[in-house]
């Protein structure tokens, strides 16, 4: 048993709505106590009780660790040339995923595992303390299975995404591929997955196929989430709400009717600023989602084709600048929003009994995350009270 008092915090974001201190439950000149991996006390510095150890964070600010609810970390290969071509005017389509599928199938387990570990470390450096990751670059029973077996070594929020795209060898008979996904592939993959996801969009899976896949996942004990409306306004949002998906992700194209559907549902609207940025697409307007009362999350969508970033501060800055979040809304979306999108109540906030997952920011306030785009402000990242990354600046 050991406790540490962190004190002299210029701004502390708690996300604790019971404090009645705005959206972020903000305290100034604050302190908190971490005890055996959990938060055991939060409040004003002057009222702090004693602890075994005392750490002064004079002038710095503290936030809950970011919760990245959408990432594709299991892959091999590099698509920088495709990115470059796109910046020179070529358009993005779902088909580019096959480039990564071919590289992933050719990689060894060790290469794939090292890739996940490298990107997870980048995430810690960007302040992410909880992340989800998906399969989806194997697209055979054996390659999806090994992707998931590797992923579960790194996070508990693992998602089976056999329905990422129709692989080349099934192009002329997509329904046979759907049958494989909901049959043999799901049976092999379900024991290693918590979630099931499907890319429901133009050039990927349509409403009926996506519905069959998510329902099969539900029957196998998995929880549904969905890639919705990245390339077009399909019926993916309707399906997300119909099946109580934890989250509908992308939402690049969104009608007013779909916004109302999301706002009236339990489904979190997850926006992925890195995807619009990296495909040079128009950004969705988060003001409409917030005004309608939807729960909104921001995630990195880290993947080698359309958003190769592990930086949540970058995503926050883009969300504020181009998706019209307030800074408060963006920080909330990257912490509590992500936790809600993963249906986690142990992370995303700093309150008594919650995980001591937090970031020390080398700035007097979280506002600097958007105010100083591209500047590395993460001083230290803690998971369950243990320092997992410390900047040597
Ligand atoms: Zn994705």
Image: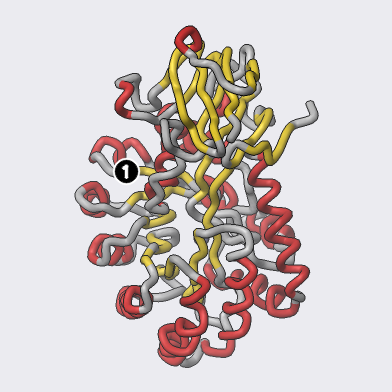
Residue at (30%, 21%) from the top-left corner?
20
Residue at (43%, 44%) from the top-left corner?
346
Observer-nearest residue: 388 or 246? Answer: 388
Residue 74 point in image, percent of width and height: 64, 65
Q: Is 144 displayed left or right of 180 in the figure?
A: right
Residue 107 figure quarter: bottom right
Residue at (58%, 28%) from the top-left corner?
3
In the rendered picture of this protein, how many numbered marks are placed on residues?
Answer: 1
Relative to 235, does residue 312 appear above or below in the rendering?
A: above
Relative to 157, does residue 365 appear above or below in the rendering?
A: above
Residue at (63%, 47%) from the top-left corner?
310
Residue 17 point in image, percent of width and height: 32, 29
- What residue is pinned by disc 1? 295
Relative to 211, does residue 367 appear above or below in the rendering?
A: above
Q: Is 241 displayed left or right of 11 in the figure?
A: left
Judge: label 1 CB < 8 Å from ligand 1.
Answer: no
Colour pattern: secondary structure
Q: Indicate the quadrant containing the N terminus: top left, top right, bottom left or bottom right.
A: top right
Q: Indicate the quadrant containing the C terminus: top left, top right, bottom left or bottom right.
A: top right
Residue furthest to the right in view is: 392
Observer-nearest residue: 365 or 294? Answer: 365
Residue furthest to the top in view is: 46
Observer-nearest residue: 279 or 266? Answer: 266
Residue 102 point in image, percent of width and height: 68, 78
Please indicate, yes or no, whether residue 99 appears anywhere in the rendered image: yes
């Amino acid at each position: 048993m050991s406790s540490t008092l962190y004190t002299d915090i210029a701004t502390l974001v708690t996300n604790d709505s019971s404090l009645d201190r705005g959206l972020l439950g903000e305290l100034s000149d604050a302190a908190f106590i971490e005890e055996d991996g959990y938060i055991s006390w939060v409040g004003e510095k002057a009222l702090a009780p004693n602890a075994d150890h005392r750490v002064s964070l004079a002038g710095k600010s503290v936030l809950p660790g970011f919760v990245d609810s959408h990432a594709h970390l299991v892959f091999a290969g590099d698509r920088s040339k495709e990115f470059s071509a796109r910046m020179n005017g070529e358009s993005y389509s779902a088909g580019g995923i096959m480039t990564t599928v071919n590289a992933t199938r050719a990689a060894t387990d060790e290469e794939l595992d090292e890739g996940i570990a490298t990107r997870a470390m980048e995430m810690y450096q960007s302040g992410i303390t909880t992340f989800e990751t998906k399969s989806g670059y194997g697209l055979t029973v054996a390659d999806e299975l090994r992707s998931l077996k590797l992923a579960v070594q790194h996070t508990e929020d693992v998602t089976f995404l056999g329905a990422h795209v129709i692989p080349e060898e099934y192009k002329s008979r997509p329904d046979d591929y759907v049958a494989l996904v909901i049959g043999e592939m799901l049976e092999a993959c379900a024991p290693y997955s918590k979630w099931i996801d499907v890319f429901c969009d133009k050039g990927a899976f349509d409403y009926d196929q996506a519905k069959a896949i998510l329902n099969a996942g539900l029957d196998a004990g998995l929880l549904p989430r969905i890639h919705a409306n990245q390339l077009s306004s399909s019926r993916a949002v309707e399906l997300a709400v119909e099946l109580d998906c934890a989250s509908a992700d992308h939402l690049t194209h969104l009608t007013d009717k779909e916004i109302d559907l999301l706002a009236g549902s339990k489904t979190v609207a997850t926006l992925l600023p890195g995807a619009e940025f990296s495909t040079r697409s128009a950004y969705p307007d988060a003001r409409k989602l917030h005004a309608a009362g939807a729960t909104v999350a921001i995630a990195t969508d880290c993947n080698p084709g359309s958003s190769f970033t592990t930086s949540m501060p970058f995503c926050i800055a883009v969300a504020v600048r181009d998706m019209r979040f307030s800074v408060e809304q963006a920080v909330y979306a990257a912490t509590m929003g992500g936790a809600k999108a993963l249906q986690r109540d142990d992370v995303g906030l700093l309150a008594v009994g919650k995980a001591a997952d937090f970031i020390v920011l080398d700035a007097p306030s979280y506002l600097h995350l958007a105010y100083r785009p591209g500047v590395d402000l993460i001083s230290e990242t803690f998971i369950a009270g243990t320092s997992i990354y410390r900047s040597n600046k």
